[in-house]
Amino acid sequence: MAERSFKAEVEHLRLGAGETFTGEGILAITKALLENGVGYVGGYQGAPISHLMDVLADAEELLSELGIRFEANANEAAAAAMLAASVHYPIRGAVTFKGSVGVNVASDALANLASSGVNGGALIIVGEDYGEGSSIMQERSHAFAMKSQFWLLDPRPNLPCITKAVKDGFELSEASNTPVMLMVRIRSCHVTGSFQTRDNQRPKLTVREALSNPQSDFARVVLPPMSYAHEQDKIRNRWPNAEKFIRERGLNEVFGPKTAPVGLVLQGGMYNGVIRALQRLGLADIWGNSQVPLYVLNVTYPLLASEFLDFCEGKDQVLVIEEGQPEFIEQQLTTFLYRAGSTVKLRGKGLLPMAGEYTGQVMLDGITAFLKEAAPQMLPALVRAPNEDKPQIPDLSKTVPIRPPGFCTGCPERPIFAAMKLVQKETGKLQISADIGCHLFAALPPFEIGGATMGYGLGPAANAAFDGGGERRPVSIIGDGGFWHNGLSSSFTNMAFNKSDGVAVIVDNYYSAATGGQDIMSSRADNPTKATKHPITKALKGIGIDWVRQVDRTYDVGRMRDVLREALTTDAPGPKVIVASSECMLNRQRREKPLTQKAIKDGRRVEAPRFGVDEDVCTGDHACIRLSGCPSLSLKKLDDPLRDDPVASIDQSCVGCGNCGEVADAAVLCPSFYRADVVHNPAPAEVKRARLRDRVIGWLQSRRAARRLTFEGAA
Amino acid sequence: MTVQETLGNRAGTHPVDPRLSGIIKLAILAVGGQGGGVLTGWIEDLARANGYAAQATSVAGVAQRTGATVYYVEMAPHRAGEAVPVFSLMPAAGDVDIMVTAEMMEAGRAILRGFVTPDRTVLITSTHRALAVSEKMVPGDGIASSEEVLAAAEVAARRVIAADFDALAVAKGSVISASLFGALAGSGALPFAREAFEAAIRAGGKGVEGSLRAFAAAYEVAANPVAEAPPVPAAKPVPKAQGPARLVAEWDRLAARVAALPGPVAEMALPGLRKVVEFQDLRYGAEYLDRLAGVMARDVAARGWTLSREAAKYIANAMAYDDIIRVADLKTRAQRFDRIRREMRVKDGTLMHLTEFFHPRAEEIAGMLPARLGARIAADPAWMARLDRWFNKGRRLRTDRLPAFLTLHLLGGMKGWRRRTLRHAQEQAHLDRWLETALAEAGRNYDLAVELIRCRRLIKGYSDTHARGHSKFDRVLAATSRIASRDDAADWCRRLREAALKDEEGTALEGAIRTIDSFA
């Protein structure tokens, strides 16, 4: 079960014609899929579309009512391959994953799909993880559309436009026999708003019905000579049909005055940012009525030469606002102008930065710079000739610390990396490669472990060059999510087949945790529609890896360290794999906290652990923090003139995971930590014993206190 | 110069009132897990319920994973059937009307990112700190300055509402999202009545009562900002000793010796005296004062007794070193048990188990032996290996149970034995050497002597950390001795010490020493 439940919101998916939906973009997309008679959906989680997968999973009941098949695919390639159902059958299908990394994984299937062409509408919803908050390399999914010849929608980021794009996408796909990619950016996925709903539609042909009447057509298979025919078909038929559809249905939009010396050409996703810049320049009102003509590309591939040239007609200059690099759109539009022998000057990158997100400031600066050169008369006087004085705001860049994401309070991965740091103190620095997932936070202080990540499921594969071994063994880290995504085949069979001498640590936290706690093959949860509880160790044995160590409590730092040491030093040949298992604390707390509270209320016996620090034993050297970084383990300045440095302190948010005590022990740090277990609803005999003990201890304490000096306010 | 700043200036002469302009732009900067999403949801619902169109966005991917997260809401009056305003999906520098920050450094980050500008922004911030890893992991004091951020906020914002909204919420049994919502209501920055805010909380339906309590408390703070008087440092209560009359009388005699010292020295010497007396006994306290007198004799009033004041602090710290006896004593005191029960909120009808984490090594055991025997054993690898075999393992001691409590209670009562131990001899020797080194400079270079005294700060921690501290201390003193004749020796000594406190491995210190080597 995922971290966030959409059970309540899913009810909104039942809204009918003429009603208003209010909520998040992700949910609106789901609703639009249902309204457009989708026959099957699938995908793989990852920000910013994780919630789309969660919504679909929570909506499974409604989906099956409508005869829609939902798959939580093993990875993006599997999701894209599923669209094969739309190749022969007139069934609409939609899959979702994150871009650009998910598209990378899916590209094999996408290329085949695009070559075969589709009969039913095929929609790929890509959450483009670019700009602030992104967790991946900064690239564009755009290039995939260009290389495989499928179409790319980039609608204006509001709910009516996004849901319309779902409808347009299916129809465009069917009109041109081509898969369509609908791109939504991080903030569009989470943007809230409203749109008018329509009734949900059952698919005209369900996947079950299709199975009763199987179809095949050799012409659709990507094999010569058909593959040559596919290429010709793309150029001769599918592309022109797409252009026709886009033009006739007016998928791209033009706003603003008919005539003006300048115009702006923009990706649909840039629209709100452009309008805001124009609002701030006094060139648009709050409803977006612009004094500068806008050509909004809700379809960013293919581009329509005629439509673009019409827009340029009578203008001196146009500015292309295209986020990301390289500037595919700008290059294409420049070609259009050149081929048409046009004298319109096209501007773009240069006035706007080539790389990086187009934030409010970037947009304002870029558009202002363009207008200053191209149409200064349009700008308010103060923008043309600014006066220079401004209040001097103190520079805080040296003061404010960075706050990257890190392991949560009580995270079971923390002790694994504490152990690894301890091992490296013995062995010296090791060659360590990492994968994708929460464990990658170990690359940041305080652990600073791992020097590379080559993609999801590829952590151990990224150490393949070192498989032959050497003075010290290479170590790789991979999560359980990565293991099932692609790691079993790409990383572990690679290790096994090549008789790798390396060490791999599989961080098994029972979920695809970094993407929001979705279930995977080895999850321990009961899941009515998915097969869970398949141990990773069994899979490893199955591919012939014999040296496998299962650690069932990662918080045992000493054992973690010993197992790592053993893996690094054993004489056993072949891959050495450690499966380190403990449940993701975020999910565990979410599951257990209500149960615990109920148990206490019901009068059942509950032990609630929490850690503490004796501040007069702590010397303020912070060695414990350098092996932890836990949010609940912080510092406190003492009101003691004799002490210089703040001491460690554990706050209320501690979940008693045990890492502090284990690390203090394994690293031989200090005796400052203690664990207090509060026993709720103790048994009567237990209370009696405790009272007796307390009396003896109390007597000893007061006896000693009476013989020595004590001070008021003493600790 | 950017356009935003120009427009800012234009507006600067006529402050923009967000209630009068078309779109209200509100940003929230929070640390993952603080409930920024809940707060955003309330604000959105509030706006929609009161005739506004609203749009919220966030970058939620890493929100729960402790990173800094931005939430953004825009709203404008809207009648059904009318066109919906075009809202932006992210805050822009110079274009934020209300900035809510759920932590002090996040306020700093908001200012740094240009989201707080004098012409328009009302800044509502909690002043509490959630320390970043980079602040916590330095061996010294790496905590960023809240004062700097507050000072910048006063310049950068149109209006600042700052209070510890976290503590306020916790006191009301709620969380910071509720108190910040109350502060937002109390600030009057949004054109909605208090009741409308409370209705939004009720509509949310979760933890309503607690949220409303925190909301109300924060509302009052924000609506009635009292001119905050600079905190008057409370006069330090003089530690009052209790116990057997004979001991109290002796304590009073020692306290009187302290009272006779010059003010700045006495201020440090009294807590120092208490520390060493608590560590050992009154005789040890007298020795402390004798040592201090030795420093006083080399000090001069003209320098404000800085040397003696610093010596009073660090001699006490050096004399009250961290040995097994001290730790065992502290761990078994009644006051400690009471404090933990309070902190863990142990109520009637519940019990508390208490587990301590000890990991003694051969060094600690040898340190407890009589000095000569201990030194022989410490020098004998075979014996040390044997001791490690016997003792070196993690021990979890349940001090709420009798066997563990008795063990520690007995160890804590071994003060009489302490003076004979190897550890004591080592500590005394080290202390004397350090003090001599520092005082030797007092006549020649007073400032250098003060800095050398302060270097004692480097020695802290247990086992490896303690050893590393010692090694850093030695390296700083050695490097200083090479340049002791220079006029700027004190300054270099200070720089070396500060470098040593920057990181665990001593990388910064190595760098500083290399610099010295280049000219020494």
Image (cartoon, coloured by chain):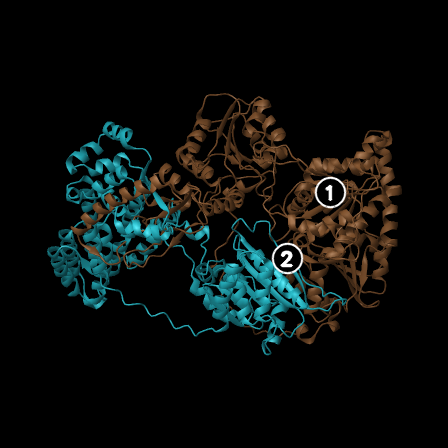
Chain colours: A brown, B cyan
Question: What residue appears at the point 73 percent right and 35 percent down from the top-left corner?
Answer: A108
Q: What residue is rendered at 50% in x and 36% in y?
A: A582
User: Callout 2: few (<14), some (14-19), or many (20+) C-alpha neighbours within 10 Å?
Assistant: many
Circles 1 and 2 in contact, beta carbons < 8 Å: no
- Give, as a three-letter code, the residue at label 1: Leu
In the rendered image, which quarter contains the N terminus of chain A? top right
Host chain of mark 2: B
Please identify the quarter of the rendering in which residue B465 is found. top left
Tell me if residue A551 comes above or below residue A394 in the rendering.
above
| Position of A29 relative to B491 (above/below) | above
SS at circle 2? strand
| Comparing labels 1 and 2, the label whose residue is closer to the camera | 1
Residue with the most extreme front position: A684
Label 2 sits on residue = B57
Residue behind mark 1: A63
Q: Is residue A70 left or right of residue B483?
A: right
Task: Using the rendered image of the protein, determine whether residue A99 is visible from the camera's viewpoint.
Answer: no
Most foreground residue, A201 or A285: A201
Q: Position of residue B395 (x, y in %)?
A: 32, 36
Q: CA distance from mark 1 to mark 2?
A: 27 Å
Is residue A174 rendered to the left or right of residue B31?
right
Q: Quadrant of residue B388?
A: top left
User: Which residue is at the far left?
Assistant: B246
Which label was assigned to residue A176?
none
Q: Nearer the viewer, residue A711 or A599?
A: A599
The residue type indicated by label 2 comes to Thr
The x, y position of residue B484, in whole percent, is 26, 54
Residue at the bottom extreme, as displayed = B13
Mark 1, other Cα within 10 Å: few <14 / some 14–19 / many ≥20: many
- Residue A239 image position (x, y, % from top left): 85, 45
Viewer-side residue, A576 vs A316: A576
